């Protein structure tokens, strides 16, 4: 029986890169007698709906893009309660998920893996409010807001140092939020939070920052900000080394409820993109995704 692969890409990309990669993959799949169904949407909500509609028709889902595109496709899978193999072609600005699972970052290599010899493995993700995927990270607080201020042109010109410059401007200006963290029914505390980082794995961008159990979310909190506190965190942001810092509280949890105190408005960023406001509920889903990997 002929297999059918759905191929999801961002059709709104200005350079048309996703569509070009999809067409190239189409040719490779055709040689393997695999049918091809392109999937794209006018915007994020439309893309999720298009993926949901296509899932019953396909045997595997290929996602072309970075963490943001992967998030949209896996959110569709969660909402459809679908479970089918997923392949990644890392072609986005942020490719943390692909780096974590050693998926080839070279487009041609990843395409050859998909259309040729590969195996699969089960990997975990998190789910926010029961209907939104978290494939790599969720952040909130002042450093998350800094990323909104960084333009692509500045990032290309100054690299990661631009985040240091922006953060220095925030020192002493923005106060910590009072946030209640309820974790795994055994921790319930209000904590001052200047910045929070929640990851689904123990690495970000290929940097392993935590040697503990991989089957849980990893939560890092920066309580307040000043010269003494910001430098260890920015050192982590640049090098990936966090575990020796005394300025950051760290937890692990499979379930978390996170609420602002005093009805403060606190917006999250999920997998790099602006997302919902607190309060949120997050659950780690072990082995939720069957992922194409190299043999």
Image (tube, rainbow, N blue to C red):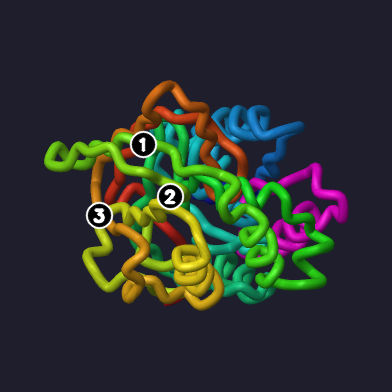
First in residue order: circle 3 vs circle 1: 1
Q: Where is residue 2 in the image (x, y as percent from the top left)?
A: 54, 50
| Circle 3 residue | 252
Residue 130 seen by the camera: no
Q: Is residue 49 left or right of residue 288?
A: right
User: Badge 3: how crowded within 10 Å, few (<14), some, or many (20+)?
Assistant: some
The Cα–Cα distance between marks 3 and 1, rounded to whole angstroms, is 17 Å
| Circle 2 residue | 196
Residue 260 seen by the camera: yes
First in residue order: circle 2 vs circle 3: 2
Asked if residue 69 lies in the magenta stretch, the reply is no
Numbered disc 1: secondary structure: strand
Numbered disc 2: secondary structure: strand
Quarter of the image containing the C terminus?
bottom left
Numbered disc 3: secondary structure: strand
Q: Which residue is drawn at 38% across and 36% down?
A: 178
| Mark in front: 2 vs 1 | 1
| Residues at discs 2 and 1 in contact (Cβ within 8 Å) | yes
User: Badge 1: how crowded within 10 Å, few (<14), some, or many (20+)?
Assistant: many
| Mark in front: 2 vs 3 | 2
What are the residue bounds of the magenta stretch?
A: 8-35
In the depicted view, which residue is nearer to us: 201 or 105? Answer: 201
Q: Is 55 drawn above or below residue 234 in the view shown?
A: above
Q: Residue at x 35, y 71 (%)?
A: 245
The Cα–Cα distance between marks 2 and 3, rounded to whole angstroms, is 13 Å
Q: Position of residue 83 (x, y in %)?
A: 39, 42
Q: Which residue is drawn at 51% across and 70% down?
A: 231
In the depicted view, which residue is nearer to us: 37 or 131? Answer: 131
Q: Where is residue 115 in the image (x, y as percent from the top left)?
A: 59, 66
Q: Residue at x 45, y 71 (%)?
A: 232
């Amino acid at each position: 029986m002929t297999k059918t692969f759905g191929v999801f890409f961002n059709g709104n990309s200005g350079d048309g890169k996703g569509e070009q990669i999809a067409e190239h993959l189409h040719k490779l799949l055709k040689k393997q007698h695999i049918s091809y169904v392109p999937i794209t949407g006018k915007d994020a909500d439309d893309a999720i709906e298009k993926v949901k509609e296509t899932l019953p028709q396909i045997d595997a889902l290929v996602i072309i893009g970075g963490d943001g595109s992967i998030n949209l496709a896996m959110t569709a899978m969660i909402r459809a309660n679908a479970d089918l193999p997923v392949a990644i072609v890392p072609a986005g600005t942020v490719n943390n998920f692909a780096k974590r699972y050693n998926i080839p970052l070279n487009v041609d290599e990843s395409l050859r893996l998909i259309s040729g010899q590969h195996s699969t493995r089960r990997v975990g993700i998190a789910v926010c409010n029961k209907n939104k995927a978290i494939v790599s990270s969720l952040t909130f607080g002042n450093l998350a807001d800094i990323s909104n201020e960084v333009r692509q042109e500045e990032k290309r010109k100054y690299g990661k140092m631009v985040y240091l410059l922006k953060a220095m401007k925030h020192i002493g200006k923005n106060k910590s939020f009072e946030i209640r963290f309820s974790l795994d029914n055994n921790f319930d505390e209000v904590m001052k939070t200047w910045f929070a980082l929640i990851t689904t794995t123990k690495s970000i961008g290929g940097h392993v920052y935590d040697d503990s159990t991989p089957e849980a979310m990893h939560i890092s909190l920066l309580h307040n900000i000043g010269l003494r506190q910001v430098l260890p965190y920015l050192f982590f942001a640049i090098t990936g080394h966090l575990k020796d810092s005394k300025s950051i509280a760290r937890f692990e949890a499979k379930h978390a409820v996170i609420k602002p105190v005093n009805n403060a408005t606190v917006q999250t960023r999920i997998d790099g993109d602006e997302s919902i406001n607190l309060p949120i509920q997050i659950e780690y889903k072990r082995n939720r995704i069957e992922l194409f990997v190299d043999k």
